[in-house]
Image: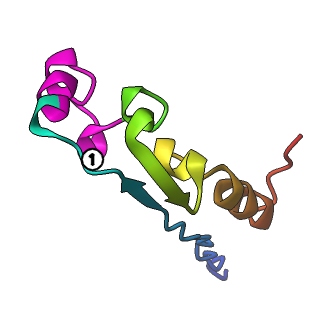
Amino acid sequence: VGVPRQRSPRVHAALSTSWVTFEPLTEQQIARYVASGEPMGKAGAYAIQGRASLWVSHISGSYSGIMGLPAHETSQVLHAAGVPLI
């Protein structure tokens, strides 16, 4: 009796790189932002969809990736894995 071969799991991956440029902030602006509580518990201490967006002068890359999950790259990986979308 032969032992069935185990299939190795397939790995799918994608890389998303995004750059966010902020205008220079004064110490007073930073202090007010920190006092608002918004940056607490956030990667990079800001939420691109929140108050910090007022100081963003340029974005290069994936807006959804900056928010937390790069939608385009995620859909490409899911498609490659055979997961039907919409």
Q: Is residue 23 left or right of residue 77?
A: left
Q: Is residue 36 above or below residue 20?
A: above
Residue found farthest to the top: 36
Dot 1 surroundings within 10 Å: few (below 14), some, or many (20 or more)?
Answer: few
Q: Is residue 41 magenta?
A: yes
Task: Read off the magenta span.
Answer: 29-46
Q: Identify which residue, 26 or 86, lies in the foreground.
A: 26
Tag 1: residue type? Gly
Callout 1 secondary element: helix
Q: Is residue 31 above or below residue 65?
A: above
Q: Residue at label 1?
A: 44
Q: Is residue 44 left or right of residue 1?
A: left
* Location of residue 16 by image quarter: bottom right
For the point 29% across and 44% down, the residue is 43
* Secondary structure character of the magenta stretch overall: helix
Residue 28, position in %: x, y?
12, 30
Q: Is residue 86 above or below residue 31?
A: below
For the point 43% across and 34% down, the residue is 54
Residue 47, position in %: x, y?
39, 34
Q: Is residue 79 left or right of residue 71?
A: right
For the point 60% across and 75% down, the residue is 6
Residue found farthest to the right: 86
Quarter of the picture containing the C terminus is: top right
